[in-house]
Image: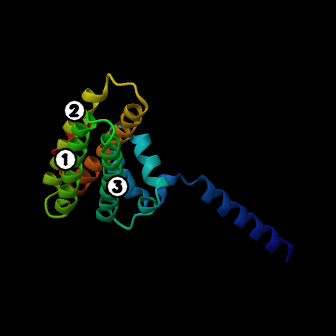
Amino acid sequence: MATFSVLSTFAAAAITLQLLLVPASASPHMKYIDAICDRSHDQDYCVKTLTTNPPTAAPIGLNPLAEAVMALTIAHAEKTAAFVAETGKADPTFTEYHKAYLAVVADLKSANLKLKQSPDTAHYDVRSSTDQMKRVEGLVASKNDQASTTLKEMTVQMEKLLDLAASAADAVDDDDENIHRRV
C-alpha cells in the first residue's frame, strides 16, 4: 500500500512537472498564432499581442484568428480616426491625418471581407494602408504638441497592427509568394 502511494505521488509530480515544462508553443492554439507571427516583422510583439488579447488568445482555427486580428486592427484604426477627427475640430491640420486614417479603415474593412475568398487581395489591401501611415508620419513628424505626440504613438501602434494583419492574410493564403515581404 505504501509503495502504491509513493508511486502515485511520484507519477503526479512527474505529470505536473511535465505540464510546467511544456513550452507555450506546444499548446494547440499556438500553431495558429505561430502561423501568423512567423510572418511578422516583430515576432515578439506579435506573440505578446495575440496571446494577451482575449479575441485572439485561444483561436479555434487560422481563419477565425485572422479575422480577429483584422478586427483588432480595424478597431485601432477607427479609434485613431475618431481621435484625429475630434482633434481636427481645434486644429485643421489634422484633416489630412483624418483622411489617411479613413482610407486605412476602408482598406482594412475591404481586406476583412476578402480574407476568405481572396487572401492575396486582402494582403494587398492591408499593405496599401502602410503607405497612408508613412504619409501620416511625414506630416506629423515635425509637430511636438500633445495631440501630435499622441497621434505619433497611435500611428506606431497602427503600423505594428498592420504588420500583424498583413501577416494574418499571408498566413491564410499560405502559398509563400509573399515571403519577400517578411524580411
The residue labelled by disc 1 is 103
Q: At 86% from the left edge and 73% from the top edge, which residue is drawn?
A: 2
The CA distance from mark 1 to mark 2 is: 12 Å
Mark linked to residue 135: 2
Q: Is residue 28 visible?
A: no
Q: Secondary structure at mark 1?
A: helix
The residue labelled by disc 3 is 75
Residue 164 x/y as whole percent: 32, 47
Q: Secondary structure at mark 3?
A: helix
34 versus 155 height, above or below: below
Q: At 17% from the left edge and 54% from the top edge, which residue is drawn?
A: 122
Q: Nearer the viewer, residue 30 or 151?
A: 151
Mark 2 is on which residue type?
A: Arg
Q: Secondary structure at mark 2?
A: helix
| The furthest residue to the top | 142
Residue 112 x/y as whole percent: 22, 59
First along the sequence among labels 3 and 1: 3
Q: Residues within 10 Å of mark 3 (few under 14, many from 20)?
A: some
- Is there CB contact under 8 Å for labels 1 and 2? no
Q: Residues within 10 Å of mark 1 (few under 14, many from 20)?
A: some
First along the sequence among labels 1 and 2: 1
135 versus 70 height, above or below: above
Mark 1 is on which residue type?
A: Ala
Q: At 34% from the left edge and 65% from the top edge, which residue is drawn?
A: 61
The CA distance from mark 3 to mark 2 is: 20 Å
First along the sequence among labels 3 and 2: 3
The CA distance from mark 3 to mark 1 is: 14 Å
| The furthest residue to the right | 2
Residue 6 sits in quarter: bottom right
Quadrant occupied by the C terminus: top left
